[in-house]
Image (cartoon, rainbow, N blue to C red):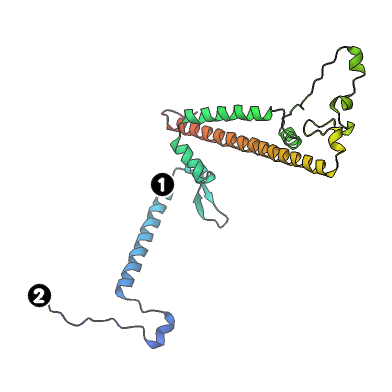
Amino acid sequence: MGKHSGRDHKERAQPLARQHLGLLEKKKDYQLRAKDYRKKQARLKTMQEKARARNPDEFYHAMIKSGTDAKGRHVVQDRNKQFDATFLKLLKTQDQGYITMQKIMNEKKLERLRADTHIPLANQAHLETKGHTASPAKHTVFVDDEAAAASFDAAKHFNTHPSLLGRSWNRPTMDQLTQGDAATAALGAVPKALRHERAVHQREIVDRAYRVDRLARVEKEMTIQKHLMTKGPRK
């Protein structure tokens, strides 16, 4: 015969006079609370025993990897938090030799970009703040003799206004300057395209420099991890 099925015995609710104290604690609630209390007391006892048995002259790495926050709570510093997810993924999946090769390739590409003689003036000012200089473009004109060189008129030779001789790009001729607003508007589109091209060039330099810096950081971190994994004393 199976177990006799009787009605469910329900525990009483909180009396009306004590409803302001919240729900009435049942036995199962007390058991959970008591179990949690005993667990915390056992942990505190273990920590107290470790503190009593601790050697004050002993050094361990947690001394320099942990501390307290502004509220006095104990926290352990996580070295991985200083790198983003992309950085950690690259660190874990790529080989150090590949990282080094990519860094060298990007460094050479960056040097070629910075040595380009067509770097715009805005880029030259940016590079000078970084400690680099870019030589301006030169235009060499060959003449027959020294007398011709002494009497050489650049404005007449290039058929342009003397104030435009400093331009190495979009230098209009005198005929174009005398054609009126239509020619001026047509010529104005060229500098805009050049400004866009130079802005792209500058952006590429900045992006390439940022990529070289990230690859150098990855290479350095991988070298540190490699040394930490080796046996023997740390140097």
Q: Are marks 2 and 1 in contact (CB under 8 Å)?
A: no
Task: Indicate the quadrant where residue 34 lies.
Answer: bottom left
Q: Which residue is mark 1?
A: 53
Q: Which residue is mark 2?
A: 2
Residue drawn where x is 45% and y is 31% of the image = 95
Left or right: residue 61 versus residue 33 is right
User: Which of the numbered marks, if any, corresponds to residue 215?
Assistant: none
The residue nearer to you, when weighing 7 against 69, is 7
Q: Is residue 153 above or below residue 225?
A: above
Q: Is residue 60 visible?
A: no
Residue 200 picture location, percent across and down = 66, 39
Residue drawn where x is 84% and y is 32% of the image = 173
Residue type at the position of mark 2? Gly
Tag 2 secondary structure? loop
2 vs 1, front mark: 2
The residue nearer to you, when weighing 185 against 75, is 185
Residue type at the position of mark 1? Ala
Task: Indicate the quadrant where residue 182 lies.
Answer: top right
Assess disc 2: are there few (<14), some (14-19) or many (≥20) residues with their C-alpha within 10 Å of its C-alpha.
Answer: few
Q: CA distance from mark 2 to mark 1?
A: 59 Å
Residue drawn where x is 53% and y is 32% of the image = 220
Left or right: residue 115 versus residue 53 is right
Tag 1 secondary structure? helix
Q: What quarter of the picture does the N terminus occupy? A: bottom left
